[in-house]
Image (spheres, helix red, strand yellow):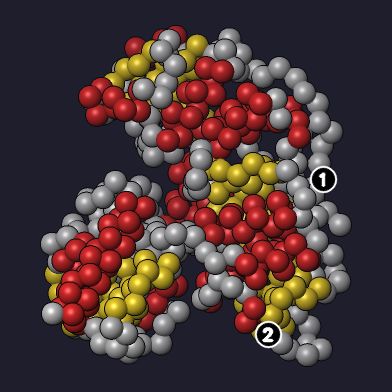
Amino acid sequence: MSIVNRQSSIKSQSSIKSSRVLVVGLGRSGLAAARLLHFLKAEVTVTDTRDKNVLSQALKNLPGDIRVEAGVHSPALLEDTDMVVVSPGVSLNQPFFDLAGERGIEVVGEMELAFRVLRPYGIPWVAITGTNGKSTTTTMIDLMLTRGGFRVITGGNLGSAITEEVLSCLKDDTAGDVEYVVVEVSSFQLESIREFAPSVASILNITPDHLDRYRDMDGYIEAKAGIFRNQTRDDCLILNLDDPLVRELGSHAPSEVFYFSTQESRGGVTPPIPRGAYLREGWLCINADRKEDRIIRVQDVRIKGVHNIENALAASLNAVLCGVDMAAIRDVLSEFSGLEHRMEFVEEIEGVGFYNDSKGTNTGSVIKSLEGFQDGVILILGGRDKGNDFTPLREYMRGRVKGLVVIGEAREKILGQLDGVTAALEAEDMADAVTKAYSMAGAGNVVLLSPGCASFDMFEDFEHRGKVFKESVRSLMKRVLVVQNS
C-alpha cells in the first residue's frame, strides 16, 4: 500500500504566462527551461557568458523570437525581468544575482520552475540526492515504478532536464496522466529551490565534493539538506543510516524519516532500524509499514558491489513508499545491470579486465569503486580538481592498488598526496593512460578508470571521457591481437 499521498489533480493555468523571464546559462537545463517558458507564453531572454560563436549550436535549439545576450550577464537585463531562472552550472555567488535580489526579482532554478509548472496537477515528486549513486538509484526507482504500472516522468541531473520532460507532457496534453515525477537532484540544483517539496526525498550519502564551489563541507551538507527543507509531516525522507553525516540530518527533518542500512540483522534480532530497508540473513528486506517483507537475496541482485546494494535498498524503499508491489521490485533488481560509465565492464585483454567508472568524479566515489576489488587494481586517476583531498585514498589503495596512472590537471596534486602508496606513472592522454596501465598489469588484474576529478580539462563531460576510455581499450585490444597473430 502506498504511503505517499497523491493530491487531487486540478488543472489550472500556469502563473508563468505573460511573465518576463531571464534564463541564465545555456547548458542542457537552461535551454530546456527557455523552451518550456516560451511554450507557456512567457517573454523569454537568455544570457550566457560564453561567446555567441561558441553557443551557435545551442542557439539553434531555441525559438527564434527568444532574445539572446552572450559574453556577459549585463545588469541592464534585470530592468525588464519578473523572474530569473538559473542553470545549475552557474554559481549564485555573483554580483549579478545579488543585484537581482536587491531589486526584488526572484531567482529560482530550473528544477523549481518545473515543480511550479506541474504543481496544479497534484503529482507527487520523488527526489534523490547524494554525492554518489544518484543516477543508478534514480534509474532503478523509475524502472520499479514503471514495472509496477505507474505512469512516470524522470529527469533532472540524469538524462533529460526535467523541464524538457515537462514540456513534452504539456505539448502532448498528458501531464494529467502522470502519477509520479522522479528526479535526480544535485547540490547545485538544490541551491536554487524555493518551494520545491518532494513527497519522497532521499539522501544516499555525503562525502567531500565540489569544494571548489562551496565555502566548506558544511556549505555542501547544507545544500544537500535543502531537499527536505519544504517537506511536511505528510512527506517521507529516506536517509542512509550507515553514513554519519546523513544519519544526523534526520533530527532536523520535518517529515517522516525512514532509513536504509547494509548492516546485517540476523535471526530474531531486532532490525537495525525501526522502519526502512536493511539486510537479514543474506536478503534485502523492507519493513516500511512495520511488517517485514523479504525482497530478494543479495546474490540475486544483478548489479554488483557494496555501494550498489545500498542503492538497491534505497530504490526499493522508495518504490514501496510509492505503492509498488514486491514482485515488480524483485524483477528490476534481478534484471538491472547498471548504467554506462558506472563500474561498467569494458573488455578483457590477456586476462586483464578493464572497468569504466568515469562517473567517479570525487574521492568518495573512487573509494566505493575500489571496495569492489580485493587486489591487483591498476587505477587511472585524475582530471580537473574540484577541491578534493586525495589522501583518504591511501588506506584503500594499500594492498589493493598495484599501480597508479595519473592524468590531467590534478596530476601533481595527486602524486604529492599519494606519494609512496604504490608505483605511479604519468600519462599525457587517455590512450597513453590505458597503454601504461596495461603495461603495469598482469593476468587476473583489473584496470579501473575512476578519475576522482571533473572531466573538463580534457573532455566535454564524464560521458565523453568514458567513451574515449572504451575506445582506447578496444584500440589496445586490436594492437595486442595483431602482435599475437604476427
The mark nearer the N terminus, 1 or 2, is 1
Q: Tell me the quarter of the picture where residue 345 sits.
A: bottom left
Q: Residues within 10 Å of mark 1 (few under 14, many from 20)?
A: some
On the image, the x and y values in percent for residue 456 come to 27, 49
Q: Secondary structure at mark 1?
A: loop
Quadrant of image for the N terminus = bottom right
Residue labelled with disc 2: 282
Q: Residue at x 34, y 12 (%)?
A: 76
Q: Is residue 209 left or right of residue 297?
A: left
- What's the residue type where badge 1 is placed? Asn
Which numbered dot is residue 286? none
Q: Is residue 51 visible?
A: yes
- What's the residue type where badge 2 is placed? Gly
Q: Residue at x 62, y 74 (%)?
A: 301
Q: Is residue 250 visible?
A: no
Q: Residue at x 62, y 82 (%)?
A: 299
Q: Residue at x 24, y 29 (%)?
A: 54
Looking at the rendered image, the disc whose residue lies closer to the viewer, 1 or 2, is: 2
Residue labelled with disc 1: 5
Looking at the image, is 397 positioned above or below residue 466? below
Q: CA distance from mark 1 to mark 2?
A: 32 Å
Front-lying residue, 42 or 388: 42
On the image, the x and y values in percent for residue 469 come to 28, 62
Q: Do residues under tags 1 and 2 come within 8 Å of each other at their CB atoms?
A: no
On the image, the x and y values in percent for residue 275 come to 77, 68
Q: Residues within 10 Å of mark 2 (few under 14, many from 20)?
A: some
Front-lying residue, 172 or 201: 172
Q: Is residue 280 left or right of residue 323?
A: left
